[in-house]
Image (spheres, grey):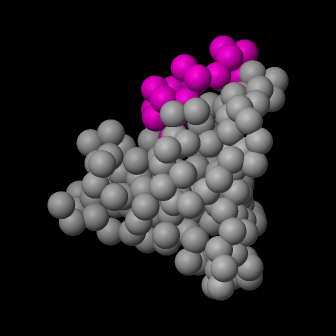
Amino acid sequence: MSITIRKAELTDIKAISELLTHLTQKYVCPTCEPSIHQVLLQSMSEENLHTYLTGNYFYMVAVSPKNNVVGVAGIRDYQHLLHLFIDDKYQGKGLSRTLWQAVKEVSLQNGNSGFFTTNSALNAEKVYLKFGFKRVADIRNREGMIDIPMSLEINQ
């Protein structure tokens, strides 16, 4: 399996949106209240992703040999990890760690001093713990969005 990790481009928006939406419906929505599902999914629309990619967000994608987006990592302000999703067929192969390391490295090169945050879905906490993130609060419910605030400090 030859996967390429690269900076996301505007031409990737449709594929990123489809991957995020599909995996969010499958894994994140069941852990949140139904009242938040549409808001959550709308945040991953092509329109919103265009705003992210042309604004203060940075995205990396994992691309298959057939040029399909099979993984995505997005970070806001080079500090807050917003998205980290891997297509089901590619999970368990270290791809999430590879994408995380790629966005982390770019963030450090762009002024991040070694402090990162994320709001983990309930079923993703173990992944973030493996990356060194720690809970900064208990499970919370923000208007139906149920998550776990986490942070990571890297000594440089």
Is 13 displayed left or right of 115 in the figure? left
Could you say which is closer to the camera, residue 42 or residue 122? Answer: 122
Q: Residue furthest right?
A: 143
In x, y percent, where is residue 95? 36, 58
Along the viewing direction, whichever of 38 and 84 lies nearer the viewer: 84
Quadrant of the image for the C terminus?
bottom right
In percent of width and height, residue 151 lies at: 70, 57
Residue 112 in the image: above or below residue 28: below
Q: Is residue 97 above or below residue 154?
A: above
Quadrant of residue 115 within the rendered picture: bottom right
In this view, the residue in front, 20 or 148, is: 148
Does residue 85 appear in this view? yes
Seen at 28% across and 64% down, the residue is: 3
Quarter of the image for residue 65 reads: bottom left
* Residue at screen point 68% across, 47% down: 135
Asked whether, in this view, residue 28 is left or right of residue 89, the answer is: right
Q: Is residue 21 magenta?
A: yes
Q: Which quarter of the image is occupied by the N terminus?
A: bottom left
The reply to whether the magenta stretch includes residue 69 is no
* Residue 98 figure quarter: bottom left
Name the spot of residue 76 as percent of width and height, x first.
Answer: 71, 60
In terms of depth relative to the viewer, which is nearer, 60 or 138?
138
**In the depicted structure, whether residue 76 falls above or below residue 92:** below
Please give the name of the residue rendered at 75% of the width and 22% of the height, measured from the top-left corner. 144
Q: Residue furthest left?
A: 1
Q: Residue at x 58, y 23 (%)?
A: 31
Q: Position of residue 16 (x, y in %)?
A: 49, 49
Q: Magenta segment, principal secondary structure?
A: helix
The magenta-colored residue range is: 20-36
